[in-house]
């Protein structure tokens, strides 16, 4: 396209690398990464549901894969990605209303999101293990 | 420079106005509620037998909430990935192909999950 050629000599905005990494900036990047990870991870849910719809033997196979050490690790990360992205979403919805942009609220929202996502993920998995033992 | 007609239509350069922005927020809110239900259902089902998973998922309330969750998530993730593609892929053809692939992926994921949930509900 002609427009992309015309734009090639224009100054670019500064690259991310020249900035000192800040927590708010990392959280913004991680929000996008977790979103993309959840996108790919949606396949895990589809496989699980289709296996359940296919019958006991297919379901058994998937449960044993999801219940393996590697499976559990992936599901743990998936849980964290979901909660991190969810809490990040809440932060963005608050910012959408024009609130929470001053330094203190910003830092609180960011740190709350990070700590909250880790705490909730651990809590969920503690509940899973406490109620089911080894899981799938 | 915007013509008076363009201003009234309010569709902007992407020709879709604020629809994308709004749909992302709308599904973000529904995702918050529905994914909480989803996590609750999965925590209660973790490691259970096929019979008990099918019994829970075929409960009409659970099934309806799971179907809503799948639809809400698929719409949200499709337009989210669209933004990622538009941000990083600038060559026309790869961008077009990825945007098509993105839509296909979202439809396949959504339809497969919905079909599986309905099959579980109506009897395996």
Image (tube, coloured by chain):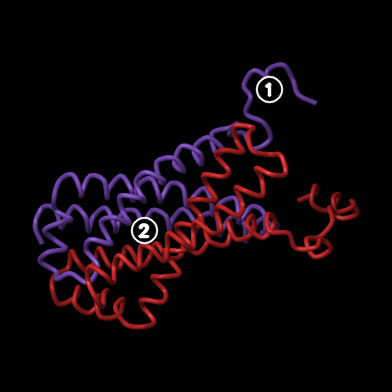
* Comes first in the chain, label 2 or label 1: 1
Question: Which chain appears red?
Answer: A
User: Disc 2: which chain?
Assistant: B
Q: Quadrant of residue A21?
A: bottom right
Quadrant where the C terminus of chain A sits is bottom left
Front residue (pair B85, A90)? A90
Residue depicted at 72% across the width and 44% down the height? A103
Question: Which chain appears purple?
Answer: B
Closer to the eye: label 2 or 1: 2
User: Disc 1: which chain?
Assistant: B
Q: Which mark is residue A84?
A: none
Q: Quadrant of residue A130?
A: bottom left
Image position of A37 with respect to B12: above or below: below
Rendered location of residue B78, percent (x, y): 48, 51
Rendered location of residue A32, percent (x, y): 58, 57
Residue depicted at 26% across the width and 74% down the height? A135
Q: What residue is disc 2 on?
A: B109
Front residue (pair B3, B32)? B32
């Amino acid at each position: 396209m002609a427009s992309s050629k015309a734009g090639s000599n224009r100054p670019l905005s500064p690259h991310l690398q020249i900035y000192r990494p800040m927590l708010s900036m990392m959280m913004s990047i991680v929000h996008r990464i977790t979103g993309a990870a959840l996108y790919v991870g949606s396949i895990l849910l589809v496989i699980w549901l289709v296996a359940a719809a296919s019958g006991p033997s297919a379901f058994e196979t998937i449960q044993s894969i999801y219940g393996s050490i590697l499976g559990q690790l992936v599901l743990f990360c998936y849980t964290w990605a979901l909660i991190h992205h969810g809490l990040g979403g809440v932060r963005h919805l608050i910012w959408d209303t024009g609130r929470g942009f001053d330094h203190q609220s910003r830092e609180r929202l960011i740190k709350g999101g990070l700590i909250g996502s880790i705490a909730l993920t651990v809590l969920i998995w503690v509940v899973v293990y406490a109620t089911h033992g080894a899981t799938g | 420079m915007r013509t008076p007609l363009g201003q009234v239509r309010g569709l902007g350069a992407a020709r879709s106005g604020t629809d994308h922005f709004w749909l992302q927020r709308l599904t973000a809110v529904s995702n918050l509620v529905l994914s909480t239900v989803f996590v609750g259902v999965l925590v209660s089902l973790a490691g259970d037998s096929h019979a008990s998973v099918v019994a829970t998922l075929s409960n009409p309330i659970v099934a309806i909430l799971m179907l809503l969750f799948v639809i809400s998530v698929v719409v949200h993730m499709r337009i989210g990935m669209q933004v990622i593609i538009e941000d990083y892929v600038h060559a026309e053809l790869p961008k077009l192909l990825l945007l098509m692939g993105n839509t296909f992926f979202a439809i396949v994921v959504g339809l497969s999950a919905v079909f599986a949930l309905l099959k579980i509900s109506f009897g395996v």
